[in-house]
Amino acid sequence: MTTMIRPAPVRKSVYVAASPEHAFDTFANGIGRWWPKSHHIGKADLDRPVLEPRDGGRWYELAVDGSECEVGKVLAWEPPQRLLLAWQLRHDFTYDPDLVTEVEVTFAPEGDGTRVNLEHRNLERLGETAEALRQSIDSPNGWGLLLQLYSEAATD
């Protein structure tokens, strides 16, 4: 019998010199300002990612040619404290409507700014490819880079 080791969630944290309201708004509504054009899954070049601002909203990419590519869904839209997203991408960054891992982002007051914590969890749902995705999203070009770019945009 083979026992699969449950991969640990990827956790990242960043301090933003902004109010929780501004930090949430920049992350969720301003995602197109800070998300790098290099990080896309569609065939065409990325115009911007979009999070529809409501529970059940879509998370998708809008390409420069007008095409759309699904990434996931908005599971919980709770400004300015929490955003919960369904990430529906396999380890090779292709969309799978039957797969859901979760990306939870919380925004907590800290001093004169906001502590933004991100956790990407339920990676075991990818089965044997879970560790490949974990390594990718925990790499220098993964969530750490994205939070750094986000932090810079949020403090402009």
Image (cartoon, rainbow, N blue to C red):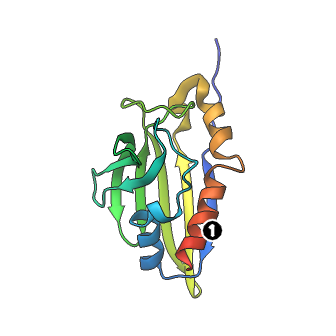
Tag 1 secondary structure: strand
| Residue shown at 38% from the left, 54% from the top | 50
Q: Which residue lies furthest to the bottom in this view?
A: 112
Quadrant housing the C terminus? bottom right
Left or right position of 98 against 10? left
| Residue shown at 41% from the left, 60% from the top | 83
The answer, for residue 43, to whether it is visible in the render is: yes
Q: In this view, does 67 lie above or below 19?
A: above
Residue receiving disc 1: 14
Where's residue 82, x and y in %? 42, 64
Instruction: From the viewer's side, name the closer residue of 17 and 83.
Output: 17
Quadrant housing the N terminus? top right
Q: In this view, does 2 lie above or below 97?
A: above
Where's residue 9, x and y in %? 60, 46
Where's residue 45, x and y in %? 49, 44
Q: Residue furthest right?
A: 140
Residue type at numbered disc 1: Val
Q: Residue furthest top?
A: 1
| Residue shown at 59% from the left, 86% from the top | 111
